[in-house]
């Protein structure tokens, strides 16, 4: 069993075949998936997708790209949303200095609000970070000193310093299709040195389809290709890596584990 720890099933690209896409994931051995909120205004839609099947979970948050267009989210907005049993994480949130679609100070303020919610609920913070390694590392360190919270850096593709900082803080790294890309040798070198008990896998679908599907629409069933590459890098067979990354997922996303126990 594998878990797709980060996908976007609410996006338009799944409008024509959402149920079939979800079924293909289950048929290919994906035992759980998390559909990630990017627009707080779309949260009800996200929850309704999570409600399709007990193996689908969701998060609540505002992507750094959307910070400018969505009115500032409050701690209370986030806390109230986490009361829903399907909401197992806070995000995605963070800093994106590559696209800079929202002013950096607004991105930081929104990020800190999400961190406060993760600290208070102890639900994991789902972090998006691009071209912002220094600010990301310093905010995470500073905020952890104010009270700890669980956290994953999703679609990890940053530098070694940020990977090491995250591991030192007790956080997790989630690996996407980027790991399979030909030009990602630096990333593979970093992941080779990171502890296997802190690694998750994800698709970030519909984006970033792993090789051999690179360039196509990504979907949760493709997570197996990223897992295969990760197992190769870590020198583990695929079954061992799958079991390990699934255990890592349920250790971090403990509210999902709790729900699983209830279902059994
Ligand atoms: Zn992201
Ligand atoms: Zn995402």
Image (tube, grey):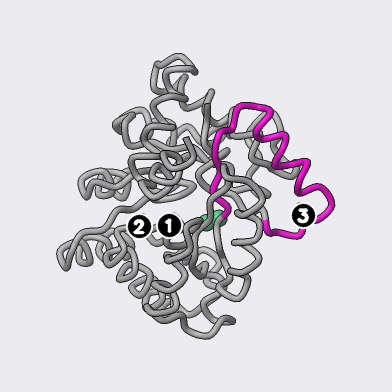
Residue at the spot x=66%, y=51% of the render?
52
The 10 Å Cα crowd at callout 1, few under 14, some 14 to 19, many 20 or more, is many
Q: In this view of the protein, can residue 182 be seen by the observer?
A: no
Q: Nearer the viewer, mark 1 or mark 3?
A: 1
Q: In this view of the protein, can residue 249 be seen by the observer?
A: yes
Residue at the spot x=42%, y=57% of the render?
89
**Camera-nearest residue between 183 and 130:** 130
Q: Place residue 76 in its image quadrant.
A: bottom left
**Camera-nearest residue between 199 and 118:** 118
Q: Are marks 2 and 1 in contact (CB under 8 Å)?
A: yes
Q: Is mark 3 within 8 Å of ligand 2?
A: no
Q: Nearer the viewer, mark 3 or mark 2?
A: 2
Residue 253 image point, x, y percent? 39, 47
Name the residue beneath numbered marker 1.
89
> Which residues fall within the magenta stretch?
10-35
> What kind of element bears circle 2?
loop
Residue at the spot x=60%, y=27% of the render?
29
Residue 177 image point, x, y percent? 57, 38
Name the residue beneath numbered marker 2.
123
The 10 Å Cα crowd at callout 3, few under 14, some 14 to 19, many 20 or more, is some
Name the residue beneath numbered marker 3.
13
């Amino acid at each position: 069993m594998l878990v797709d720890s980060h996908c976007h099933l609410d996006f338009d690209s799944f409008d024509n075949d959402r149920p079939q896409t979800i079924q293909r994931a289950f048929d290919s051995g994906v035992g759980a998936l998390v559909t990630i909120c990017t627009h707080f205004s779309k949260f009800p839609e996200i929850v309704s997708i999570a409600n399709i099947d007990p193996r689908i979970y969701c998060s609540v948050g505002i992507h750094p790209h959307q910070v400018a267009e969505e009115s500032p989210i409050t701690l209370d907005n986030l806390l109230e949303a986490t009361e829903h049993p399907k909401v197992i994480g806070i995000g995605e949130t963070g800093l994106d200095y590559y696209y800079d679609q929202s002013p950096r100070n607004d991105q930081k303020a929104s990020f800190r609000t999400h961190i406060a919610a993760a600290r208070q609920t102890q639900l994991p913070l789902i972090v998006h970070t691009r071209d912002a390694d220094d600010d990301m590392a310093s905010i995470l360190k500073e905020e952890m000193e104010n009270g700890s919270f669980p956290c994953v850096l999703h679609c990890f593709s940053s530098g070694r310093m940020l990977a090491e900082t995250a591991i030192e803080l007790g956080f997790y790294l989630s690996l996407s299709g980027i790991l399979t890309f030909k030009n990602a040798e630096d990333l593979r070198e970093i992941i080779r040195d990171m502890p296997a008990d802190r690694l998750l896998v994800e698709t970030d679908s519909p984006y970033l389809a792993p090789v051999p599907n690179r360039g196509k629409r990504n979907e949760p069933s493709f997570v197996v290709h990223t897992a295969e590459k990760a197992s190769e890098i870590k020198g583990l067979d695929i079954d061992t890596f799958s079991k390990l990354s699934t255990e890592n997922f349920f250790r971090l996303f403990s509210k999902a584990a709790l729900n699983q126990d209830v279902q059994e």
